[in-house]
Amino acid sequence: MKSNIRDMTTGSPTRHLLLFALPTMIGNIFQQIYNLADSVIVGNFVGTNAFAAVGATSSITFLFFALCNGIGSGGGVVVSHYYGAHDEKNVKKCIVNSCLIMLLVPVFFGILGFVLAPWLLKLLDTPAEILSDAVLYTRFMCVGLLFVSLYNFISSMLKALGDSKGPLYFLIISTVINIVLDILLVLVIPLGVTGVALATVIAQFISVLLSGIYAYKKNPYFRISREDIKFSVRMAVRIIKLGVPMSLQFALIAISSMALQRVVNGFGTVAITAFTATNRIETFIHQPYMTLAAALATFSGQNYGAGKNDRVVLGYKKGFLIMLGLTAFLMLVMQLFGNALVSFFVSKEDIAAPAVIRLGADGLRITSLFYLALGMIYVVRGVLTGIGDAFFALFNGVIEVIGRFTIPLLLTAYLGFGEKGIWLASGLVWLLSGATAWIRYKVYFKGKTATAAERHPHRFAFRMRGQSSR
């Protein structure tokens, strides 16, 4: 029954990272295909304005997803620590309490987002011709927020226990369902943006339903009895203590993205469409980095819980080498095939298509020069998230907000870079955030060598065994 649970406290770090990362990356790619289907169908069969409307909602929907998913991620970190410490009783207790929290938080933020959608989109200076579709799509995403949050909660718990295969299965299934429903509700039954949004929400619901059944059937820690369903203030505080800074970090990133979106909106529909297309493409670029970060978070969390700080540092070094290889490959692809990639999102019959493709391709070539900094953010974030460094999560979010509020405006309004300054600003923000991440890692682990960990294991061991005996 425990065949999908991976203990990363022994064995080759590189092997653990790669074997964990591969299913996660495949799952993430399918999740982006799931999003890509919406974009391609809307852009080619509904129109440029509809595509721009969907794109204009991305920073707002990400904000509400972030506020919810940070709590689930915090619970996952706590579970990895307990599992590394072989404290099975508290693994179950953490899963129960995380679930109770995740049943309440998405409902609150979903209602809030539904009500505030028109105001938020106007605040971002969304063009009038796409505002109604943007409001409609945002509200559908707020309805589906509970399903997305519950799926991410289950996925975080499974991954914290080393199971990266389970979440993959349901992403594949939901992706196929989403594409089929897109075709049905947009091409066969022409519901436009409503059809795309409805297809996404239905697919999200099916994904959380199937993943919940899988977790119960295949993972013994999810076999919750009536006696297990007890709210623990101590456990909830620990989850929230780690989860809230993560939520705030993601929320700050979302707010900074909204600031950038407002700058983009000021350049008109062509710029919005090009920016939306490059965002969809770069979402794929983020996937291998995100996958590596998830693997490092689980690896670091389990080893930190086991008191093996030397293996945490070794995991970082191996992860950094993997990241360098990924960066070289992805940068080459963007430099050579930018035009072809952007053209997937634009109907060839659209009069604005050549301008969109040209601007989007130039944008991809600019941002690809900063992929090394982007990779550094994810590698360090994965390690520090795994050990529960809540300070870094919040601090890094603040740095990104400052960068996204100041650099785009500086480049586009004062230094004369025009529309291309949008993409240059994104790259410079990655550079700023990546540098601070690297500095934080160096400061945190300064002097914490393998020898120090062996001499003073109590400094690095996860202290929950003592807490649970109180």
Image (cartoon, rainbow, N blue to C red):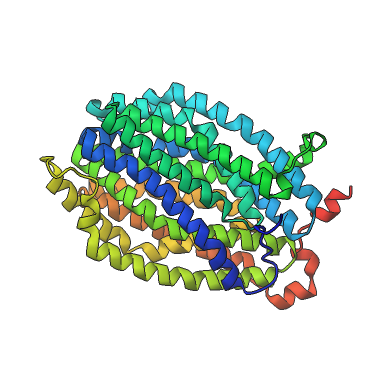
Residue at the location (78% across, 48% down)?
90
| Residue 368 % position (x, y) | 31, 62
Q: Is residue 352 visible?
A: yes
Q: Which is nearer the eye, 349 or 251?
A: 349
Looking at the picture, does residue 69 appear above or below residue 295?
Answer: above
Q: Residue at x 29, y 68 (%)?
A: 332
From this viewpoint, which residue is outermost toward the bottom?
A: 451
Q: Quadrant of the N terminus?
A: bottom right
What residue sits 25% from the left and 60% below the top? 365
Above or below 362: residue 272: above
Residue 125 shows in the view: no
From the viewer's perspective, is residue 97 above or below residue 402? above
Left or right? Give the position of 386 relative to 458.
left
Q: x and y percent of residue 291 in the render?
A: 50, 58
Q: Is residue 118 left or right of residue 147?
A: left
x then y, percent, for residue 5: 67, 58
Q: Nearer the viewer, residue 101 or 150?
A: 150
The percent position of residue 188, horizontal first and vertical second, equals 28, 30
